[in-house]
Amino acid sequence: MKNARERIFAIIVGGVAIVILGFFAYGWVNRQFDWRTKKIVGLKDAIKKSERQAALGRAASRKIAQFEERSLPANAEIAKTRYQTWLVHEMEVAGLVEPDVRAVSTQGGDKDLFVKQLFAVEASGELPELVELLHAFYSVDWLHRITQLKLRPLKDSKKLDISMHIETLSLRRASSLDKLQPRLSKRLQLVSQDAYYDTIVARNFFGPRNQEPKISISGSQDVFFPRAVELTIKGTDPDPYDQVYYKLVESAAPDAKLDSVTGKFVWTPPAPGTYEFLVEGTDDGFPAKPSNREKIVLKVKEQVPVKEGLTFDYAKFTDLTAILDVAGRGEVWLHVRPLGRIEVLHQGDRFEIGSVKGTVSQIGEFDFCFDFEGKRRKLARGELLDQAKVVGDVPQVAAPAKPAAAEVEVQAKPDDKAS
């Protein structure tokens, strides 16, 4: 019995020992598993971090490669010369006046990755010209940027005083050593330069709203075939610094010419008849504004032949074409149409054209007065000379007449006979 109890006790002790040893063995194995698991997680995190670092390095390499493509020439001195030449050229193309580009400073040595250069730019010009320069600047994909831009309106002018600071970079490993590589930029949002004109120039930050010009026609629109037609389109603009330019909107003849600057209209009709033209002016304000439209109706008539023995009266075919102010002195233009000749008169000049013989007494803005047969007569622009209206008697005290050398006389000669 004793041996049996001892065996049972031994079995129980052994089982307990096994359980205790198993418990400690399980804990040790579990701790080892947890440590290995954490080690694996740490290694995986390290791998991910290394992969991220590698990805960032590859992205940085690609970025540096792009910078090297966009860089100015690697040789800093050559880059400075080439860039100054390009910038002055673009300023001249834009129409800026007296462009000046100076290299102010250079930063970076032989051991640096890049050299930064600062340029000071000065010029004068109008707002559209500045927009054109800025469009050219941002249209090329180089490592350059405007760090400062100052605009100052000039007094009594539409021009601006322009001042800029520009920074450029030249990378040591740039793709080009000695020349600027043409590269088209994708930084511009609008599709064209005209779109920037509409957005910027049309707002005109530096002046009041642009006002429309007006045009008028000077000269007779009755023509005798086959004489040439000469008219003048005159434009006025309430904005004192605006220039008006002219164009034919509709034309009855492709060979009719209208000078866009002077407004002079010239044409030789091919045959008698009625011809219509439509003209318009446009100013150069910000934004440009069109004028009213004026219609030219030319009534081209056959010239009546002169019968033998009859006197041809040139006064019936002479009209007041224009009145000008030349250096502060009034000037009258009489168009003797049968002869195709312009008689230029000033105050005090004596003239004789056909049946009218007179002395210029006054010159107004749209008409002039002359004394003839003891009466003072007035002739308005576009009226015929023989139809001048009587406005009163000639004053008793008249200004002394000019020497006979100043007289203008138009007489019919055998060669002047109308055909």
Image (spheres, rainbow, N blue to C red):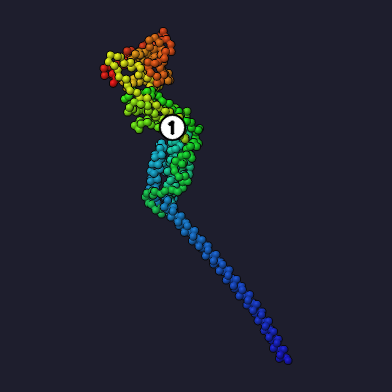
Q: Can you give x and y, in whole percent of width and height, for residue 145 in the image?
A: 46, 46
| Front in this rendered view, residue 52 or 102 | 52
Location of the N terminus (image quadrant) = bottom right
Q: Residues within 10 Å of mark 1 (few under 14, many from 20)?
A: many
Reply above or below: 297 against 405: below
The local secondary structure at tag 1 comes to: strand
Tell me the kind of residue under disc 1: Thr
Q: Can you give x and y, in whole percent of width and height, for residue 186 in the image?
A: 45, 48
Q: Is residue 355 visible?
A: yes
Query: Which residue appears at 47% of the width and 56% of the height?
Result: 60
Return the residue found at the far left: 414
- In the picture provided, is 144 more to the left or to the right than 409? right
Q: Is residue 120 visible?
A: no
Return the residue found at the far top: 396
| Front in this rendered view, residue 29 or 387 | 387
| Front in this rendered view, residue 419 or 201 | 419
Reply above or below: 93 against 337: below
Query: Which residue appears at 47% of the width and 44% of the height?
Result: 190
Query: Which residue appears at 39% of the width and 29% of the height?
Result: 277
Look at mark 1 in the image and give the residue it sits on.
282
Q: Can you give x and y, in whole percent of width and height, for residue 202 in the image?
A: 48, 37
Location of the C terminus (image quadrant) = top left
Q: Quadrant of residue 365?
A: top left
Query: Which residue appears at 41% of the width and 25% of the height?
Result: 217
Q: Can you give x and y, in whole percent of width and height, for residue 196 in the image?
A: 46, 41
- In the picture provided, is 335 more to the left or to the right than 211? left
Q: Quadrant of residue 395?
A: top left
